[in-house]
Image (cartoon, grey):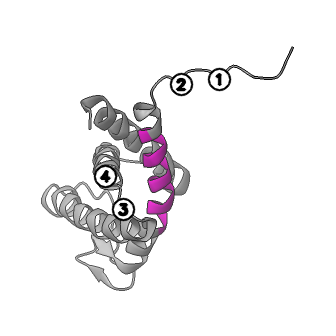
Amino acid sequence: MKLSQLLFSFLMGYFCYSLIEIVMRGYTHWTMSLTGGMVLTILYAINSRRTMTLIRSCIIGTFMITAIELTVGIFDNVIMHWNVWDYSDMPFNFLGQICIPFSAFWFVLCIPANRLCKRISRQFCNKKAVPIVSEQPM
């Protein structure tokens, strides 16, 4: 895996997740942009494995994203008091930083993320194809 692939996947995650947050909440926070980039980079590495199925990718992605969300949430919201998000009103939340409904959302979000990772991989891994000359007479 090349550094350029990882950098591109980071930038795609950075901008795509920021856009999702802006569309859904009306704003985002710079730490969420960085987190989105880090998450897509890790998902890209996970999805680069030939044996990775979509369902396995979504399950691994859900747990990985939830763990990162908890880590970032503790830093952003508990330690720094930036109040980036608060899931305290959500059912089955832990410290107001993670919750089951958003973990389910991460599972669903892993489906288009998986497709994006495969597309990035194809873009970087495709070699220049030699055009095939038509055998039909002109």
Measured Cα–Cα span from mark 4 to mark 3: 17 Å
Position above or below: 31 against 65: above
Farthest right residue?
138
For label 4, the residue is 39
> Could you say whether the residue bearing mark 3 is in a helix, strand or loop?
loop
For label 1, the residue is 132
Residue 127 is inside the magenta segment: no
Q: Amino acid at mark 1?
A: Ile
Whichever of callouts 1 and 4 sits on the residue coming sooner in the sequence is 4
Farthest left residue?
79
- Note whether residue 15 is visible: no
Measured Cα–Cα span from mark 2 to mark 3: 26 Å
Which quadrant of the figure contains the C terminus? top right
For label 3, the residue is 52
Magenta span covers which residues?
108-121
Please give the label number shown on residue 129: 2
Q: Position of residue 124 (x, y in %)?
A: 41, 32
